[in-house]
Image: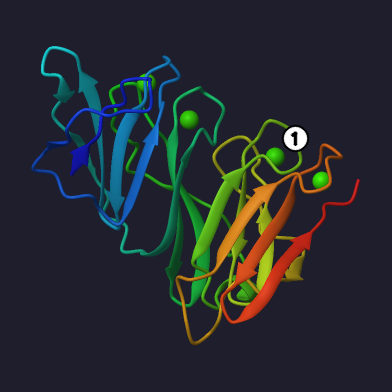
Amino acid sequence: MSILLGKGDGTFSESEDFEWRVGRFFFVEDIDQDGRDEVIRADEDFVEVRRWDDALAGLGPATRTEIDDDLSVAGAAIADADGDSIADLVYLAQRNQQMYLVSYLGKRDDTFDVLGIESDDLGPALLLGGSRMKIVDVDGDSAVDIVVASTETISVCFGRGDGTFAPPAESYEFYTSDRTSSGSSKIVVGDANNDGLLDFLGTRETRPGLMTLLQEP
Ligand SMILES: [Ca+2]
Ligand SMILES: [Ca+2]
Ligand SMILES: [Ca+2]
Ligand SMILES: [Ca+2]
């Protein structure tokens, strides 16, 4: 892993290399809301947090949490799912042909509670290549929600504010990716029509144009 340190004038100092391979999921987030970002990497069976160390002028040692839940993980997000101001790790995971959202609650010491809080089965719509997720507060109730895009649908799993998420009430047809080619499509959450309500925008490699799904008041 290397870091380019910004000097604040658009230039950067030389990168520094660390013997730390980035896992499948990689985040830079202020997980404890102290105004300083932490670096997090995660994979199916672990999550590691590293903090910037001023004395080292580099990242300090990794604090590691092993996760032994036998899940097949399709997506991951870092956000405070239970409202205690410490970020949590949320996996979109598959087990026995069912999809779940599993929250591992973050603790003050940069570890995570290994007893994941599982949502109910999210239903069959999310099984079809459900591999893209975004964590955002869609309805503005200050509990983060999970947006899941599968091959042909987009669904919202509303957060209950305690680390659990409700199965989606509806799935919207939304061509975010191809069955034949993955990894080239994008989904973005933003307010497309400036009405204060978040909307979804997506592109697809083999189909020109931008799809917009507007949230209704
Ligand atoms: Ca921090
Ligand atoms: Ca939390
Ligand atoms: Ca919400
Ligand atoms: Ca809107």
Looking at the rendered structure, the number of numbered marks drawn on it comes to 1
**Residue lying at 8% horizontally and 43% vertically, measured from the top left:** 19
In this rendering, is residue 183 above or below 78?
Answer: below
In this rendering, is residue 167 above or below 146?
Answer: below
The residue beneath circle 1 is 140
Q: Nearer the viewer, residue 215 or 90?
A: 215
Task: Specify the quadrant that holds the N terminus.
Answer: top left
**Left or right position of 18 against 122:** left
**Residue lying at 19% horizontally and 40% vertically, measured from the top left:** 2
| Residue 89 place in picture, x, y as percent | 41, 42
Say which amino acid is labelled 1. Answer: Gly
Q: Nearer the viewer, residue 207 or 13?
A: 13
Residue placed furthest toward the bottom: 180
The quarter of the displayed image where residue 72 is located: bottom left
Q: How is the image coloured?
A: rainbow
**Left or right position of 120 against 35:** right
- Disc 1 on helix, strand or loop? loop
Query: Label 1: few (<14), some or many (≥20) within 10 Å?
Result: few
The quarter of the displayed image where residue 64 is located: top left
Is label 1 within 8 A of ligand 3 (CB to nearest ligand atom)? yes
